[in-house]
Structure formats: C-alpha cells, structure tokens
Image (tube, rainbow, N blue to C red):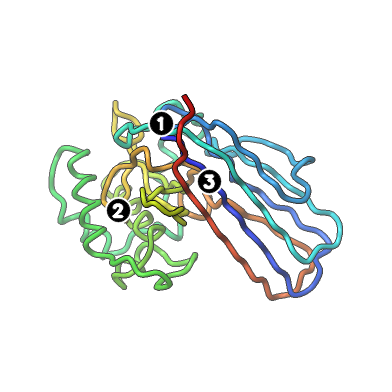
Amino acid sequence: MLVSIEHVTRYSLSAPASYSIQCLRLTPPSFDAQQVASWTIETPGIDDAVRFRDCFGNIAHLVVLPELHQEIEIVARGTVETRDRAGRVRGLVEIAPVRVYKRETAKTAPDAGIRELCAGIAVDDPIERMHMLMKAVNERVDYVVGATHVHTSAADALKDGKGVCQDHAHIFISAARVMGLPARYVNGYFFTASDEPSEAHHAWAEVWIGALGWLGFDPANMICPTENYVRLACGLDSGSATPIRGTRRGGGAEEVLDVTVEVQQQSVQQ
C-alpha cells in the first residue's frame, strides 16, 4: 500500500528565543515492511542540519537556530510503500544490543499492579503470551483522550484504567520486561482505511522473541502492525523515541504547541 503523510508541528513562544537546538526523529526508515518513496523535512535551519543515527538506530537531524525567533514550524511529508509482515520486523539498522531493551525507565517501571497483570498470564509459548498480554492491556485500559499526559507512567495509567496509545504501549512494554522479554516503544503513523484523510500519529510496542526477532504488538487496536502502519522511531519509552526534542535560550515560560497529522492512501501508478 502506498501511503502519503503530512506531519506539521508549530511552536509559538510568548517571547523571542535567541537560540534553539532540536533533534528531529521525523524520517521513517526503509526496511522489510516499508520502503520510503519520497520524504522531506521543511523547517528553518534544516539545510545545515546534521543527519545521524541515534543510539537506537533512528534517523535523526540536529537543527540549530542561532538567531531570534518566536515561532517554529516543522513540516515532514512524503510517501511510503508498506507491506503486511504480520508484525515481524526485519531489515532495520540495529545499533543497541537487544539486552538494552530490558532496561526499566521512569515511564515503564513496574509496580504491584503490573506484576499482578503478568501473573494472570500463565502460558509457555511467548507469542501466545504476548497476544494474551495485548488483550489484557486493551481490556484493562479504556482509550480516553486527555486522561493522561506525556509524563504519565505505565503504572499510573493501569491504575486509572484510562489512557491513549502511548499508555497502552508503556504498560505492555513494562509487563513484557517483567516477563523477561526485551521490549521497546515505537511511534509512527496509522492509516485507518477511511475515505477521508486520517489524523493518526500512533504508538505501539515491539518484543524480542528468540529466533523470530522483533515482533510488533498494538494493544490500542489489539492487532499486530499491518500495511496500515508506518514506523518512524523507537526507544526505551516515549521519551527516547519522541519525534521532536529540543531546548532553547529565552522564549518565555509559555509555549503553545499545535500538531496535525494526515495519513492517506495513494493510488499506485502502473
């Protein structure tokens, strides 16, 4: 399937900033499940940006704005051809050893609730166990926009029983690590197959399962990723996989952030 994506991020500061530096993980990789046909990033300073691979293998750009600015717009757009691989991930550039993805973070640290969730899933086959875990997370946490924020932990989201795809992924990752399996957070885009453009910046999880390697699970939709998914970046949690992270000098305390994402299927030219 050929998918077109436009991801627009706008920052508005309450006062001019004299300097800012941002790390952009806004370029999808090509691998077995997807091939990037075209991709551009438009933002001030992108022509002089340093392109590199971060410690998780993500494609990143370091963008510096050394002059006064009060607004920043970042537009990432392009087309990606996707294939259904039943969630299996092959052909990615991998830099971090698999064992790194067993590491706990503040957002994925397990508590008694997450350990109890794991205890209720007693099957030997790791793939079946992950499918049961995906179902359990989906049933325990209702999808409620605005119920959580970027700093909400997996433990808190499970306790509240409400959250969004980020929280589903964090809970799943935390539980998978409790079960002894390396797990990582993935963000990207999800095409909902509707007639209208879908606004869907999405998150899911991947687990390392022996000889199979990395296998994706989306607790929010209770499926393994298909051709409707476009992968962007991965990390230990949402913080290390975030599409945009930066710092600035000045700019005041107030910051208004506006993000729009459109994902649409394109017809393939014969």
Vertical relation: 178 (above or below) 15: above
Q: Which residue is mark 2?
A: 221
Q: Residue furthest right?
A: 67
Who's the residue at 32% across and 65% down the image?
143
Q: Nearer the viewer, mark 3 or mark 1?
A: 3
Spatial CA span between label 3 and label 1:
16 Å
Q: Is residue 137 left or right of residue 68?
A: left
**What's the amino acid at mark 2?**
Asn
The numbered mark, 2 or 3, whose residue comes first in the sequence reads: 3
The secondary element bearing badge 3 is classed as strand
**What's the amino acid at mark 1?**
Ala
Vertical relation: 240 (above or below) 55: below
The numbered mark, 3 or 1, whose residue comes first in the sequence reads: 3
Categorize mark 3 by other alpha carbons within 10 Å: few (<14), some (14-19), many (20+): many
**What's the amino acid at mark 3?**
Ile
- Labelled disc at residue 5: 3
The numbered mark, 2 or 1, whose residue comes first in the sequence reads: 1
Who's the residue at 41% across and 31% down the image?
33
Q: Nearer the viewer, mark 2 or mark 3?
A: 3
